Image (spheres, rainbow, N blue to C red):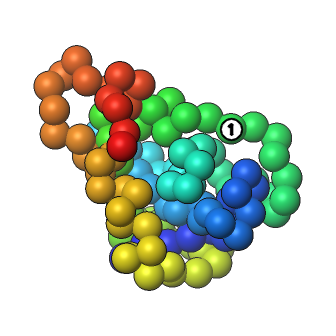
Amino acid sequence: MLYSAGDCPVCSRAGDLLFVRDPITRRIFFYCPACGCAWTSPPPPHTLDSIEAIGVYAPKGIDLPTLSDIVANGMEAAIERSPDDEEWVWALEEILMINVDADTTLDTFSLR
């Protein structure tokens, strides 16, 4: 199940700030699959102070946190909606915990 912190400040209503997690460090952060930008916390609506590539926070890929993970990290107040998995699964497939050799990172991995 996907959880969103709202509209992406880059893409507006075309993108979602999805809760994602680095499977190695278990750190939860926010990622928009429409534009590929990531944040450590959801930016204020319609405000763009900073952007990062997903590889900055999860160089080997991501996994999806459960609601329990989000609650355990004290981030449940940021949940605005739960988008349909089918809406974004196509954009997440290749970065969900990339199972490749140790030299491949999201900086060197070519996304379709």
Q: Quadrant of the C terminus?
A: top left
Residue lying at the far front in this picture: please name it: 112
Residue 105 picture quarter? top left
Q: Which residue is mark 1?
A: 51
Residue at 43 percent across and 67 percent down: it is 88
Please indicate, yes or no, whether residue 68 appears anywhere in the rendered image.
no
In the rendered image, residue 60, in percent from the top left (x then y), is placed at 31, 34
Q: Can you say whether 84 is above or below 7 in the image?
A: below
Residue lying at the far top in this picture: please name it: 103
What amino acid is labelled 1 in the image?
Ile
Residue at 32 percent across and 29 percent down: it is 109
Number of numbered discs visible in the structure rendering: 1
Q: Secondary structure at mark 1?
A: loop
In the rendered image, residue 64, in percent from the top left (x then y), is placed at 36, 61
Residue 77 picture quarter? bottom right
In the rendered image, residue 84, in percent from the top left (x then y), is placed at 44, 81
Left or right: residue 49 versus residue 112 is right
